[in-house]
Image (cartoon, rainbow, N blue to C red):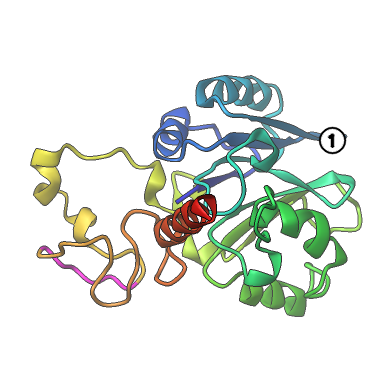
Amino acid sequence: MCLLTYFPPGATSDLTALRNGARVNKDGHGFAVVTETSVLVGRGMDAEEVLDEFAVVRDRYPDGPALFHSRYATHGAVSIDNCHPFRLGRDQRTVLAHNGVLPRRVRPAPYDPRSDTRIAATTYLPHMPCGPLDTTQGRRGLESWLGTSKLVILTIDPAFAHNAYIFNESAGIWDSGIWYSNPGYRPEPEPALLRTHTWHYVCEHCGELDFSRRGRYCGGCGWCFLCANPFPHCDCAQRIATGVALRRNATR
């Protein structure tokens, strides 16, 4: 699933929502906070430690944009090296974090421990292949390349017109002044109360209501209720396929 959260300047951190996301996305966590002179980054495998560090840094620098990411691994090793956010190339002034599955050209080859986002951040996106991000053509090109994925970039590089960018913003959710990449920030309802929570049966992608749904996918458009991505870009399916491939290689 992954949960990518963006905080506009001045927005107060909702640690409860971030904990909800970290509870189901346990493969590493990270944050970035923009200050007047730098982009402060923290990453780690322990959710509570990273959340505590983020709370302290965000309280100290509330006036800039910020992001928080909890990872659900689909490509690459489960390690701190694959925790978001990533520096854009070697530029210490710009970072990015991503939710979803990126195109094949940036997916790791067999035995490559890097994640797709890490590869994109270090080797592909620094060249601005879609054009300048402050142009309509550049934004549309990058969003088209991302497909159903979402991307947040934070920067203090004066070459950029803004300190923060959200790509495929409309595919996420604004809630109380904070942007979330998917509904993973919401608390899990009690099993006995599931049918009283109509939203649990409403597809976030196409709006279809289906109380008889048995699987994880929406019968109308294929949207996954677990990872909030439409088929075939479902993170769950990608993770299962990756696990099967690894098991096959291990038995050879």
Residue farthest to the front? 252
Give residue 241's position: percent from left, percent from top: 45, 61
Rendered image quadrant of residue 58: top right
Q: Secondary structure at mark 1?
A: loop
Horizontal side of residue 170 vs 17, given as left or right: right
Q: Is residue 70 left or right of residue 202?
A: right
User: Where residue 216 sits in the image (x, y, percent)?
Assistant: 26, 60
Give the magenta-colored segment's residue range: 206-211
Q: Residue at x 86, y 44 (%)?
A: 93
Disc 1 target residue: 38
Residue nearest the viewer, comparing 110 with 231: 110
Is residue 165 magenta-colored? no
- The residue under the point 87% across, 66% down is 127
Q: Residue 50's spot in the image, x, y percent?
A: 59, 25
Decide if residue 16 is on the left or right side of residue 195: right
- Report the amino acid beneath label 1: Ser
Query: Residue 223's image quarter?
Result: bottom left
- In the displayed structure, would residue 244 be above or below residue 83? below
Q: Tell me which corner region of the image, top left, top right, bottom left or bottom right, holds residue 31.
A: top right
Near-viewer residue (117 or 172):
117
Percent across and percent down for residue 105 are 70, 71
Which one is nearer the viewer's eye here, 37 or 27?
A: 27
Q: Is residue 207 magenta?
A: yes
Using the image, determine if residue 122 lies above or below residue 40: below
Question: Vertical placement of 125 versus 190: above or below?
Answer: below
Q: Is residue 194 visible?
A: yes
